[in-house]
Amino acid sequence: MMQQLDHNQSLPGRTHADHAVLVGLGLVKTYGPTVALGGVSIAIREGESVAVMGPSGSGKTTLLHCLSGILTLDSGQVLLDDDVSRVRVDGLDAEQRSQLRRERFGFVFQQGLLLPELTAQENTALPLMLAGVGRRAAEEQARGWLAQLGLAGMEDRRLGQLSGGQVQRVAIARSQVTGAGVTFADEPTGALDQATSAEVLGALLDATVGRGRTLVMVTHDEKVAARCGRTVRLEDGRVVSDSNPLRPALDGAA
């Protein structure tokens, strides 16, 4: 069972105006002598879209992976406060973090990381089936999401029968089918041409922030970042600028 915080305990950012659904406090992650994150603190509002930018090696992907529980921290805290419960992500063991990622986080990566031997419908339904939903119900929900993302009639196609943009739409459907409140995207349009990139980004924003959900996205593309509500820039493992910081959440944690 996941370690949860006492609901009477004060959590940074828990206000009616600016609810911080995800907070990272003093995040430190090193790889040998290399400091990937050097004490990063960030608070992310419920329902906002955040673009994380910076040069290669600045810590963007490491930050994404630490916030989502893919990587463990050397030190610091990650707090998730959504409609389900309050959880210290960094306090969970490997199995609990895996469960958290399956049930409450969505992921969209540059290459999709879908299973090529499965159809679009099967790929989309898979997270629900892993969570214990019956196959018929899972596939029905999967069809609904694929239709909403413009893939009606393509449910039985395998990835090799889809365009790059269509594959990314399947990845978006898979990331949202469980009702995940927070979605993490790492260069989701990086392998697409400009026109397809714009279309896929629009679909991703509609599926997440368009439904009141939260999107945290790593990108190197200024045009992609400009369509997000907030841009956070990293250099050498530290935040060097934030276009719309949620200061009360961080100050309240001191």
Image (cartoon, rainbow, N blue to C red):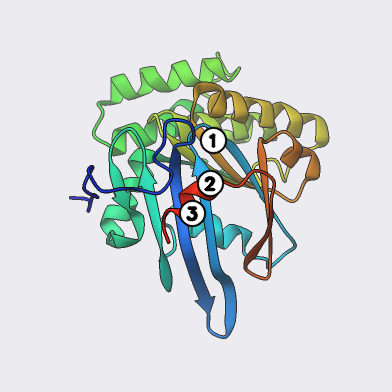
- Mark closer to the observer (3, 1): 3
Of discs 2 and 3, which sits in the foreground? Answer: 3
Q: Mark yes or no: residue 213 visible.
A: yes
Q: Amino acid at mark 3?
A: Leu
Q: Quadrant of the C terminus?
A: bottom left
**Residue plotted at (48% across, 66% down):** 26
- Measured from the top left, where is residue 4 in percent x and y? 23, 49
Q: Which mark is residue 250?
A: 3
Which residue is disc 2 drawn over? 113
Disc with the residue nearer the chain's start (2 vs 3): 2
Three-letter amino acid code at the position of disc 1: Ala
Q: Which residue is mark 1?
A: 171
Please tell me whether residue 109 is drawn above or below residue 134 in the rendered image. Answer: below
Answer whether residue 192 is visible to the viewer in this image: no
Task: State yes or no: discs 3 and 1 in contact (Cβ < 8 Å).
Answer: no
Name the foreground residue: 98 vs 20: 20
Residue drawn at point x = 37 percent, y = 17 percent: 140
Query: Circle 3 sits in a helix, a strand or a loop, which is it?
Result: helix
Q: Secondary structure at mark 2?
A: loop
Element on which disc 1 rests:
helix
